[in-house]
Amino acid sequence: MNQTRQFFDIDEKLLLLAEQTEQDIRPAFERIESNAFQNQQKVLAAFIRNRVGENCFTSSTGYGYNDIGREKLERVFADAMECEDALLRHNFMCGTHALTVALFGVLRPGDKMLCVTGMPYDTIQSVIGISKQAASGSLKDFGIAFEKVDLLPDGDVDLEETRNRLRLDASVRMVYIQRSRGYALRPSLTVEKIEEICKTVREVRPEVMIMVDNCYGEFVQLTEPCVHGADLMAGSLIKNPGGGIAATGGYIAGRADLVELCSYRLSTPGTGREVGCTLGHSREMYMGLFSAPHVVGEALKTAAFCAGLFSRLGYGVTPQPNEPRADIIQSVLLRNPESLIAFCQGIQSGSPVDSMALPEPWDMPGYDNKIIMASGSFTLGSSIELSADAPLREPYAVWMQGGLNYAAGKTGILIAAQRMLDKGLARMPCAGN
């Protein structure tokens, strides 16, 4: 406590509140640590079964033919995800790119994509062709239709309406599930809920593909969506599965025939996954995957601490501090733009990189509102590292995620809270509360 005051000038009352918070969230920590231990064993077993060796880390150039490290890494990842096959490549530029390759890889003109988790994340709206921003080359431009099933008032998936849509519309080729909440306050989806959705789809239309946007959800629970009925899932390596070490990249994983189709979209029909040099990225991707279960656990602890501390400061939070989690994201309802900006600026000032920067809302490509983003990270835009972002719109909630280690993540949260206190935007609770 004394060192924290020495280095960061955190109010002693806030530090005491942090100690009380950690006592309250001990059940959440125990659950997180247990899951991390089991997921780490699963990943270690995948490395051992696939006989990873030093020769897997060599660099390839040009076409990248017969790159042993690339091929084995994809087998390790598929094994760890408990699915048939995977593409794991550094040339996926972001999670949205991986999702886009998957969508264009398996959908064809005349097909319809039905999202059963309401309106998908902002950047995917441009891919679909439903964003306010013009997006040439969208699914819509290629004759692929989109519909959504609105969520129920409590944020749950409307399974009955999903059944009705599938019964009445033979053009639905894919059911799309966004696991994480995006810029919404609905619950993120557990793998158990995803299994319930998959069973509902299979009862009505067993031939329909089920795809999951798995961003922020990897290694949070003990299994992944493909174990529970999903055909395909995709995500980013600068989120959970890159472990804070992979410098770029993404993945598509699931049914082998669908992954193969996606590989033709990633490269070209006929060459598919056989090409793609690694340029020296293999070692960091292997190391990132190996570290991912532990790092995800640290991020989850940071999220639980954030929920506990800010609920004690009187703010609405979702998930609740001891609530089981389906992703690494923590939402805090900050009520006004001033508090939202102050929180993000506090996170930035508590970051190891670019702590001197002062984030401000700006018009960011792919979004319809001004966005504020705090991310003082070793990898630009990495959201497995401590970060926070939000659109400047009602209800002025912030979405916080990441934390390579809990000690630094906790400190960053304390600095954000202190900044709000210093600006008179937050108040310490009364004694005894």
Image (tube, rainbow, N blue to C red):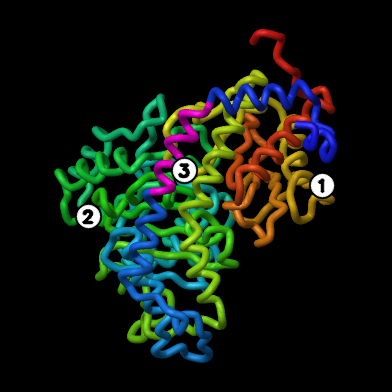
Within 10 Å of disc 1 (Cα), the crowding (few <14, some 14-19, many 20+) is some
Which circle's residue, 3 or 2, is located before the other in the chain? 2
Q: Which residue is mark 1?
A: 358
Q: Can the viewer see residue 107 in this picture?
A: no
Within 10 Å of disc 2 (Cα), the crowding (few <14, some 14-19, many 20+) is some
Q: Amino acid at mark 3?
A: Asp
Q: Secondary structure at mark 1?
A: loop
Q: Amino acid at mark 2?
A: Val
* Residue drawn at point x = 35 percent, y = 82 percent: 269
Which circle's residue, 3 or 1, is located before the other in the chain? 3
Q: Amino acid at mark 1?
A: Leu
What type of secondary structure mainly makes up the magenta span? helix
Q: Which residue is mark 3?
A: 327
Which circle's residue, 1 or 2, is located before the other in the chain? 2
Q: Which residue is mark 2?
A: 208
**How far apart are the two marked residues, 1 and 2, measured between alpha carbons?**
47 Å
Left or right: 294 as drawn, with respect to 81 = right
Q: Quarter of the image for the C terminus: give it.
A: top right
Q: Is residue 240 above or below residue 395?
A: below
Q: Nearer the viewer, residue 380 or 135?
A: 380
Q: Nearer the viewer, residue 228 or 371?
A: 228
Q: Which residues are magenta?
A: 25-37
Q: Is residue 192 above or below residue 354?
A: above
Residue mark closest to the camera, 1 vs 2: 1
